[in-house]
Image (tube, helix red, strand yellow):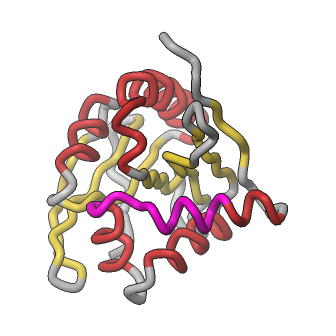
Amino acid sequence: MRKDWHMEEFTGTLSKKKWRDVMTFAANLRQADVRAVEAYGDGDATRQVVLSQENSEGCWMVYDKDRRPIVFFGRVKPKALRGRLIWCLATDGMKAYEREFAVVSKRILTYWAKRYGVLFNAAGCFNEAALRWLKWCGAVFYDPFLVNGEEFIRFYIGNGEEAKCAE
């Protein structure tokens, strides 16, 4: 597997350089991710990317060979639920690294599922690439619902018990 990409941790307070990378990433989100975060949030995709980072107990940015941010992902420890809420956003630049990202992310999600018991969230039904990736990673889908007119579906990865995912 080629290794002309790298990953950096983005947990906690960010340096100016990492903050600029978050802004660059947010400005280049793929359309399906813009649609999802705008439906869930206040219509400001950049703000939702920042909130994802701020609310995460751990998050990472993936860079391409030219050091452009292409994937941003993390996990959130819910206050009242067990397991972890996971999230992943991407730019169109991720297409060049789909196979590599799929292999590495599946390993990460498998590790997290063993460590935390269950991983969960919801994905936009319109985001076919994300749904394929999640299915390949072992996600079980259930209970579709609407958010601001957009259809989403809950999923979990882990020990086979559903976790409630807040709408």
Q: Position of residue 52 (x, y in %)?
A: 56, 67
Q: Position of residue 43 (x, y in %)?
A: 38, 86
Instruction: Count how many numbered circles sit on residues in the image.
Output: 0
Compared across the picture, whether 50 is left or right of 157 comes to right
Instruction: Judge whether 18 appears above or below 80 on screen.
Output: above
29 is within the stretch colored magenta? yes
Instruction: Judge whether 126 appears above or below 136 on screen.
Output: below
Q: Quadrant of residue 14?
A: bottom right
54 or 72: nearer the viewer: 72
Q: Position of residue 59 (x, y in %)?
A: 64, 51
Residue at position x 15%, y 70% in the image: 151
Residue at position x 51%, y 39% in the image: 117
Q: Position of residue 11 (x, y in %)?
A: 74, 55
Range shown magenta = 21-32
Compared across the picture, whether 8 is left or right of 70 comes to right
97 is within the stretch colored magenta? no
Residue at position x 33%, y 37% in the image: 160
Residue at position x 17%, y 61% in the image: 143
77 or 60: nearer the viewer: 60
- Taking the view exactly as shown, the residue that stands out farthest to the bottom is 42
Compared across the picture, whether 145 is left or right of 59 comes to left
Q: Quadrant of residue 137?
A: top left
- In the rendered image, is residue 13 in sight? no
154 or 34: nearer the viewer: 34
The C terminus lies in which quarter of the figure? Answer: bottom left
- Taking the view exactly as shown, the residue that stands out farthest to the front is 66
Instruction: Judge whether 153 appears above or below 110 on screen.
Output: below
Main secondary-structure element of the magenta-colored stretch: helix
